Amino acid sequence: MVEVFTDEDRRNINALAEEMPKLRILLEELIETFDVLGDGETMRSIRASEKDLQEGGLLDFSDALKELGPR
């Protein structure tokens, strides 16, 4: 019988198979990042939020509750 794969090849294939779910998740996250970066409206919203944060225009949770008042 002719061996197509060496023991090292088999180890590498097994290691790759074990990493595939992680690679799939990373690829999905990368695609989502590209989707966000490519969406002008979303990027404008992110930039506006960053500006609000820099200018102190955001409330922390306790201050937001105070502004909403009792229910």
Image: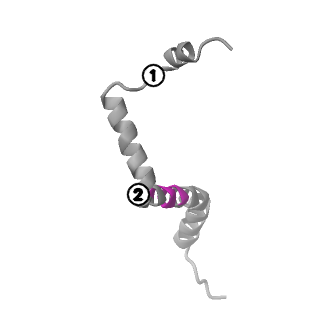
Asked if residue 4 lies in the magenta stretch, the reply is no
Residue 5: x, y in percent? Answer: 57, 78
Q: Tell me which numbered mark, 1 or 2, is placed earlier along the sequence.
A: 2
Residue at the far bottom: name it: 1
Question: Where on the picture, by quarter, is residue 41?
Answer: bottom left
User: Which amino acid, by three-letter code, is at mark 1?
Assistant: Leu
Q: Residue at x 56, y 64 (%)?
A: 16
Identify the mark at residue 34; answer none if there is no mark.
none
Q: Main secondary structure of the magenta part?
A: helix
The image shows a total of numbered marks equal to 2
Q: Write the start and end of the magenta stretch as one range.
A: 28-33
Question: Which coloring applies here?
Answer: one colour
Q: Amino acid at mark 2?
A: Gly
Q: State the image coordinates of residue 25 (x, y, percent, origin top left).
A: 57, 56
Is the N terminus in the top left, top right, bottom left or bottom right quadrant? Answer: bottom right
Image check: 46 left or right of 7?
A: left
Q: Nearer the viewer, residue 38 or 34?
A: 38
Kindly identify the residue that appears in the image at 45 percent across and 22 percent down. 59
For residue 40, the mark is 2
Q: Are marks 1 and 2 in contact (CB under 8 Å)?
A: no
| Image spot of residue 45 (x, y percent) | 42, 45
Name the residue tied to disc 1. Answer: 59
Label 2 Cα neighbours within 10 Å, binned few <14 / some 14-19 / many ≥20: few
Q: Nearer the viewer, residue 57 or 29?
A: 57
Vertical comparison of 65 with 22: above or below: above
Residue 71 point in image, percent of width and height? 69, 14
Above or below, 18 against 69 in this view is below
Q: Secondary structure at mark 2?
A: helix
Q: Residues within 10 Å of mark 1 (few under 14, many from 20)?
A: few
Q: Is residue 31 magenta?
A: yes
